[in-house]
Amino acid sequence: MIVTYLEEGFEAVLQRHHARLAATLMSKLKWINEDPYQIDLILAAANHDNDYTEFRRNGLLNELGGPRDFKMETFNKADCQRLLDEAYAHSRFMAILIAHHIQFVQRDLSAAAAKYCNTLEDPKRHWCKELGLSIATTDRYYAMLQWCDALSLLLCQRSIPPEGRSLEISDGPDGVTYFISAIEADGYVIDPWPFSTTEFTVAIERRLLKKLTFKNDKELQEALKASAVIVQQITFTAST
């Protein structure tokens, strides 16, 4: 889960909701218009965190008993393999993207993570050969997923600086670095503009936990279920 500390308590955005936001952003990108893998790209964005479900997961608390932020997660081979298997059940193309994502996120976490990530190279190359795609081509496709993931995380973490100051998102599949800046409360512009429409709105569901510590995972899970859902509407507008 994505946890932000506020004066009122902990704010949590659930991991799969973050992925849903990434998929919504993916669906708006001009890069995927009429692309043969358009659906796979959206599904990959929507499912890239499918191994993480707060309501049936253990280890949700940090050492102090507070909710554990996603950045504190450690490598778990079984979780990674399950995520890859589920992607492969969708399509080989989606499995390629998820293998890329596992390598991007996990490789530097530990020696075991690096070893596992290295084993994904052969399956990736095999799937690419079957689909008639080059590794360079799938690298560009993955750049779209990574870009949407990065932007979704920035929004979920409330990381965008105020007063129009720009923040780097990531490089797109075109090799260009993209930046986001606030133009008003809950209103943002991205430069250069990567979307197919000049304006659109997305929603983020946030849960406020006023209690700072929990006895166990179950107590936190019940608090997440009982918490009111605060919906933040965010509008993106192309600069004129």
Image (cartoon, grey):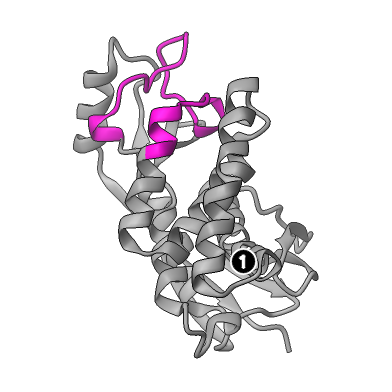
Left or right of 185 on screen, residue 209: left
Q: Where is residue 237 in the image (x, y as percent from the top left)?
A: 61, 80
Q: Is residue 139 above or below residue 56?
A: below
**Residue under the image location 56 percent in, 67 percent down:** 129
Q: What residue type is labelled 1?
A: Thr
Q: Can residue 32 be spotted in the picture?
A: yes
The prevailing secondary structure element of the residues shown in magenta is: loop
Q: Is residue 149 above or below residue 226?
A: below
**Residue under the image location 63 percent in, 27 percent down:** 109
Q: In this view, does 71 lie above or below 213?
A: below
- The quadrant of the rendering that contains the N terminus is top left
Q: Can residue 155 be spotted in the picture?
A: no
Left or right of 30 on screen, residue 64: left
User: Quick one: 68 or 238, which is closer to the camera?
Assistant: 68
Instruction: State the image quarter where residue 111 is shown.
Output: top right
**Highlighted magenta segment, given as a residue range:** 54-81
Q: Position of residue 169 (x, y in %)?
A: 70, 58
Left or right of 127 on screen, residue 216: left
**Residue under the image location 40 percent in, 12 percent down:** 65
Q: Mark 1 points at which residue?
A: 138
- Indicate the secondary structure of the residue bearing disc 1: helix
- The quadrant of the rendering that contains the C terminus is bottom right
User: Quick one: 36 or 203, which is closer to the camera?
Assistant: 36
User: Quick one: 200 or 137, which is closer to the camera?
Assistant: 137
